[in-house]
Amino acid sequence: MEARAFVLLKLALVGASVLLSSLAARRFGHAVGGTLAGLPMIVGPIMGFVLLQEAPAQAGAIALATLVCVPATIVHVLTFAWCARRGRRWGVALLTANAAFLSVGAALLALRLPPPLACAAALASPALGALALPRLREPPAAVAIPRVELACRVVAAMAMAWCIVRSAGAAPAGVSGLLLAIPITGNVLPCFTLPRHGAAATVALLAGFVRGLLGFASFFAALYVGLAWSSPAAAYVLAWLCALLAAQALRATRTWTVVR
C-alpha cells in the first residue's frame, strides 16, 4: 500500500509540475517555464516525505545519489538543444538526448565519485552547460498554449513517469536508480515546444531549465550537508532556501541569459 501511495504521489507531483511550468510559460515565456521545470518541484516534496520516514543517513545517501546524475541531466539538455538548433525533429532529439543521459549517467555511477567531488560536479555542471547552449534570439513574451495541449502535456508526463517507475521496479538496482533520474519535465516540455514554437523557443525553455537545475543541485547539496550538521527539518528548509536563491541569482545575472 505504501509503495502504491508513493507512486500515486509521484504521478501527482509530475502532473502538477508540468502544469505549473506550462502555465508559467504561457504567462511569462518559455524561459520562466523552463526554470520552474528545472527546480526540484517533484523530488523536493518527495524528499520531505522521505525525511519523515527514513533516518538522516539514508536521506543523505539518496541526496548524494541524486547529485551524481545532475551532470548527465545537463548533457541531456545540451543534446536536445543542439538537435533542435540543427533542425532535427522532436522524436530524434528525444531519443538522442536520452541515449546521452543514460550513457553519461552510467559512466558517472561507475566512477563512484567521492561526496565532495560529486557535489562540486553537480553545482558546476549547470554553469558549464549554460555556456555550451546554442545562442538563438527569443524575446521573453507570453506563449499561446491551448488547454488541450496543457492536458496532453500533463497526461504525457504522468504516463512517462508511470512507465519509468514500472521499468525501474523490474530492473537491477543500478539501472533502476538511473531510470528514476531521467528528467521527465526535461523530456516532455521540449517535445511539445519544438514542433509548435520552433528551435528558438525550445532553446529558451532549455536555458531556463538549466537555471532551474542549479537550484536543483543546490537543493540536494545543501540537504546532504545540512543532514550531517543539523536536524532534518532545518536541513530541508535550508535546502529550499538555497534552491530558490540560486535560481534567482542566475536569473539576475546577464551572463546566464543564454537566449537573447
Image (spheres, helix red, strand yellow):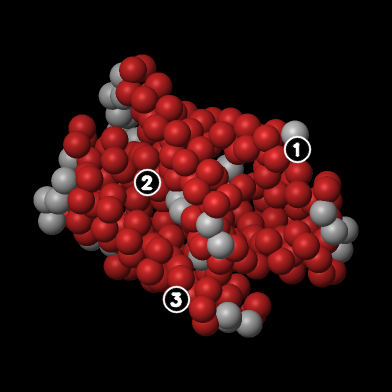
Q: Confirm whether residue 201 shows in the render.
A: no
Q: Distance between the residues labelled 3 and 2?
A: 21 Å
Quadrant in the picture for residue 57: bottom right
User: Residue flagged by tag 2: what amino acid is it?
Assistant: Asn
Which residue is the site of mark 3? Answer: 107
Quadrant in the picture for residue 80: bottom left
Are the two marked residues, 3 and 2, in contact with CB atoms closer than 8 angstroms?
no
Which residue is the site of mark 1? Answer: 2
Q: Where residue 226 sits in the image (x, y, percent)?
A: 78, 64
The disc at residue 19 is none
Q: Where residue 241 sits in the image (x, y, percent)?
A: 68, 52
Q: In this view, does 75 lie to the left or right of 8?
A: left
User: Residue flagged by tag 3: what amino acid is it?
Assistant: Ala
User: Residue flagged by tag 1: what amino acid is it?
Assistant: Glu
Please rate how many residues cluster around mark 2, counting C-alpha atoms within 10 Å: few if below 14, some from 14 to 19, many from 20: many
Please rate how many residues cluster around mark 1, counting C-alpha atoms within 10 Å: few if below 14, some from 14 to 19, many from 20: few
Which residue is the site of mark 2? Answer: 187
Tell me the quadrant of the picture where the N terminus can be found: top right
User: Element at badge 3?
Assistant: helix
Q: Distance between the residues labelled 3 and 1?
A: 32 Å
Q: Confirm whether residue 153 shows in the render.
A: yes
